[in-house]
Amino acid sequence: MTLTEQMTELARQAKAAAHALTRLTTEQKNRCLRAMADAIEQRAAEVQRQNALDLEAGEKAGLSKAMLDRLRLTDARIAGMAKGLREVADLPDPVGRVLDERTRPNGLRLRKVATPIGVIVIIYESRPNVTADAAGLCFKSGNATILRGGKEAIHSNRVIAETLVSAANAAVPEFPDHAIQLVPVTDRAAIPALLALTDYVDLCMPRGGEGLIRAVTECSKVPVIKHYKGICSVYVDREADPEMAVKVSVNSKCQRPGVCNAIETLYVDRAVADRLLPELAEALWKEGVELRADAEAHQRLAPLANGRPLKPATEEDWNTEYLDLILNVRLVDGVGEAIEKINRHGSHHSDAIVTANEQTARRFLNEVDSAAVYWNASTRFTDGGEFGMGAEIGISTDKIGARGPMGLEELTSYKWVVTGTGQLR
Amino acid sequence: MTLTEQMTELARQAKAAAHALTRLTTEQKNRCLRAMADAIEQRAAEVQRQNALDLEAGEKAGLSKAMLDRLRLTDARIAGMAKGLREVADLPDPVGRVLDERTRPNGLRLRKVATPIGVIVIIYESRPNVTADAAGLCFKSGNATILRGGKEAIHSNRVIAETLVSAANAAVPEFPDHAIQLVPVTDRAAIPALLALTDYVDLCMPRGGEGLIRAVTECSKVPVIKHYKGICSVYVDREADPEMAVKVSVNSKCQRPGVCNAIETLYVDRAVADRLLPELAEALWKEGVELRADAEAHQRLAPLANGRPLKPATEEDWNTEYLDLILNVRLVDGVGEAIEKINRHGSHHSDAIVTANEQTARRFLNEVDSAAVYWNASTRFTDGGEFGMGAEIGISTDKIGARGPMGLEELTSYKWVVTGTGQLR
């Protein structure tokens, strides 16, 4: 079989499984998910044995310490996978929700009903726990999943996928085996081959670094929802409460700097720079943050630095996701310039304004073109759990299909169900 | 300027206009739309003069009669454009709708609010009236539009676009001129150049034949929502009311055979073929329909044909959109086989079951993977107007972003608007 034939077979089986999934009840799906969780725990030793093979090969191949860490299935990560699957079982079924309902003058009854999307390809990098997390969410939302993890995690991914499928099958015989499939080859050409199959594959979600996402978007003929980088920001307005401005800025940057909804740039209204800039800088320096300032802010802060990290920002810095304790500081002339700069340099992910002026806030919330816009709160809340959605598969930075945190509801499409009594046009 | 530079400039201007559009009120948008409608009527003579240039060039270039007909801006079509724009003005503003609302235990207030998508590229073929229809819908939903019509309609499209922009601008000075732009070159390479600009373009919608849609999907790096062909069907179940089965089948095929929601295949339950097949065939023949039947149906119908059009169906016929008075007839063993065949051969557009059995109907409605599924009604109702949405830009056969008729609401995305009182994580 050529690679294309192999991928076609895989995708065709997934499509058939997607159809079979439409027949499972919510109760059957939940029983499968709980059985999967139990099986992951019961087979933990085997999973870790397979994981050790990947770790060994990774060490030989000279993977970085950070990559090896992401690859490692510790006891806590095994427990995390099982817990995640049980949480998904506990969430409401997103399929079948009636999104809209109307009766037309001719008596036709229309209902817009949430449906599974169909076949979803998930492409990810070194974290093998994504295998269970993504498969669980896609399965609960009625989708067949084709998983394509990094080749460095192939043994781990394989044993996890096999464990999920065999557990589900034992719990509910109607579970279609091909509802969760792993791409069985590590050949890179498998990705474009799979993403050319528009008759079978309904959606692709790449999860990982910018390079991976770009490569997938470039080659895909099927729709892609991108979970892109987070260049987020806080704008401190002239009417900000100073204490809140400091707290929100520090929290948005420092509470967990390595995640996508941590900020990379702090915009400060020039009108209050004199008063607020020193206070903001002191608080950020106290947390060990390196500041990269525009010329004017740099000039104001330099005399205060006393050896604390301060650099002039480069043009490139405005477009950089640091994922680290580094923060750009930039003065702007009010909310208008802040909006313009955020829309230009940000990644349309999460941006906050701190102000006591409702009109200013409304303008920011309306005009900043981001998935989540905040008024007087930390950007760190952009998260499925914090939004009350439960588990999420990622944060979409796209506008088509889903935007922001993608929980179970965002993994569905819809259809129009029309019932009549013989209506003709 | 290279073509890429030219397209980048166009798209950058569209992005800036999209931002400016977020500041227009509903009342301002409606005033623009009504001014556009008036201007189209007032400048009808000039529009038709430009249209005559296209028609003349088209005749010289040997365009088919059907293409010339689509190209021609008759008085009725001019009036239709104006009427369409006024109807869009009368529809509710889809932007700002609150789709979901919740307050979290920490006091954060979340609202999921409908927003414009941003910059939408519309690629279409010979009908110049699409210029006004698409621009009006995209504008009302707050999007900047880049229109790319067929080169055979360039004069007509140009005068229409100019008319819309100058009228809107005169009515509302805040109207951003680049909210409605026409690609100024007919070079085919403009399309891939434009659809590579992921920083500026948010969505592309190709409207036209299969070739156009495939070409756009192949080259686009931005999300595409496809308005694909309609291979629709009616399934007559063993428990169908015979009279309703005949009426729904005839209406679904014959009321307007040239449109996407007319059916191409009639599936008949083998259990009632003896009784219903002759009746169905007679009614269809009476309307002048050519039947293409599978072997068994052909055998049953041949003795009844008496010179009326009947052919054996080929394998290719099951996947063909005739847009004509031709209909496949195929026997199936009940609803299960009907579902399987519709999902395999149909285009996931509109499919109907005629049955008196609710359980059978529920299975069909659940398992047929189409944008619109009907129980005891004609497939011809899949239409924005019939669904009560008002004007539509097309019928999406995709599942991501929008499915089925795309009215104003389907031309929006959403954002999460989060308001707090200094909440930190």
Image: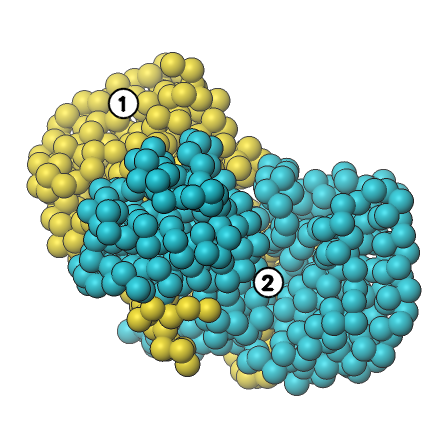
Chain colours: A cyan, B yellow
Q: How many marks?
A: 2
Kind of residue at disc 1: His
Give whichever of A122, A17 is nearer the camera: A122
Tell me if residue A294 comes above or below residue A54 in the rendering: above
Q: Which mark is residue A393?
A: 2
> Residue at image x 45%, y 37%?
A311
Placement of the C terminus of chain A among the 4 image quadrants: bottom left
**Residue B248 spot, x, y in % from top left:** 47, 67
**On the same chain: label 1 and label 2?**
no
**Foreground mark, 1 or 2?**
2
> Residue at image x 63%, y 76%?
A88
> Residue at image x 57%, y 80%?
A91
Q: Chain of mark 1?
A: B
> Residue at image x 17%, y 55%?
B26
Q: Which mark is residue B33?
A: none
Placement of the N terminus of chain A among the 4 image quadrants: top right
For this view, does A76 lie left or right of residue A333?
Answer: right
Give whichever of B88, A272 is nearer the camera: A272
Q: Quadrant of residue B20?
A: top left
Badge 1 is on which residue? B155
